[in-house]
Image (cartoon, helix red, strand yellow):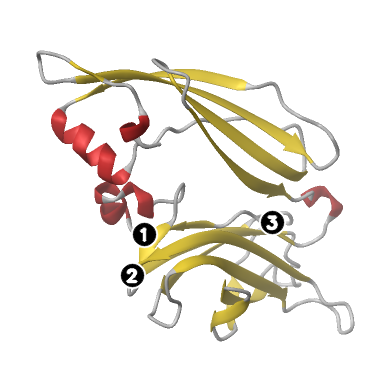
Amino acid sequence: IYPRSFSLIHDLQDMYHGAVRLTVTAHGDDGRSTIPLQTTNELALKPAQYRFGIENGLTVSFQMRLPGPGVWQIRAVVADGASDRLGSATQFVEIPNVRQNLMAVSGLILSADAAEVEKHPMKGPGVRIFQSGQTCTFQYGVFNAMIGLDKRSSLEVQTRIFGEGRVVFEGKPGRLDFGEAPVGAMRQILGHLTLGPQIGPGAHILQVIVRDMLALPGQPRTAAQFTDFQMRE
């Protein structure tokens, strides 16, 4: 959220005061919806914090429990506590049904490194705005990977980036072998990605494709996941 749109009071102690009301709901593809989550956040910003917020925005975190698997649209509405101004955003979240024993990939977390995010929150996982040449980290989990007789798993992973309806980056498939783990364990994958000049400015989609190398011939097990991000010059 950006404090430049809020009605903040600048007091004699050189502090900026205001309030932000946040309402979040989730709507499923099967018609289900959650009870609205409502919070009020009081703002008390020092001049440096206010200037930082004007340039980079302020981050508000919240937790909500979804009723079950499926595709969910998260809707957030932000209201200025001192006026009638509103702002909104939406994001789709897919929760796989891991109990069906199908291979599935969790949501992607894409972010710059922690030190960079502390300086520029827009490069964090909640906003995902980067510059050309930056190296980012992405991570995700794989559910229900097949386990061999040695209780190990083997996966092939590949990354792609789409921009303006075409592939602007395609990584080479790489094989990952995982050590012994119990049935049903999630396999965590961490990768690094340098956003080269060929990607260009604008809106993009990062896609990961996972193939189970222990699947039987003729019965492939493949899962994919994606997240969006922006590139700015």
Q: What residue did someone put label 1 on?
A: 112
The amino acid beneath tag 2 is Gln
Mark 3 burial class by Cα count in 10 Å: few <14, some 14-19, many 20+: few
Tell which circle, 2 or 3, labels the residue nearer the N-terminal end: 2
> Which quarter of the image is occupied by the N terminus?
top left
Q: What residue did someone put label 3 on?
A: 182
Q: Nearer the viewer, mark 2 or mark 3?
A: 2
Mark 1 burial class by Cα count in 10 Å: few <14, some 14-19, many 20+: many
Tell which circle, 1 or 3, labels the residue nearer the N-terminal end: 1
Relative to 72, residue 96 above or below: below
Helix, strand or loop under label 3: loop
User: Residue farthest to the front?
Assistant: 84
Residue at coordinates 73% horizontally, 74% vertically from top-left?
A: 212
Residue 228 location, x and y as percent?
Answer: 55, 60
Relative to 103, residue 72 above or below: above
Image side of residue 208 versus residue 196, left or right: right
Residue 48 location, x and y as percent?
Answer: 15, 35
Residue 141 location, x and y as percent?
Answer: 61, 58
Residue at coordinates 76% horizontally, 77% vertically from top-left?
A: 214
Taking depth in this image into account, of 64 and 141 the one nearest to the observer is: 64
Disc 2 + disc 3, Cβ < 8 Å: no
Label count reads 3
Residue 134: which disc? 2
Residue at coordinates 69% horizontally, 56% vertically from top-left?
A: 182
The amino acid beneath tag 1 is Ala
* Spatial separation of the CA atoms under disc 2 and disc 1: 8 Å
Which quarter of the figure has residue 165? bottom right
Residue at coordinates 33% horizontally, 68% vertically from top-left?
A: 233
Helix, strand or loop under label 2: loop
* Spatial separation of the CA atoms under disc 1 and disc 3: 32 Å
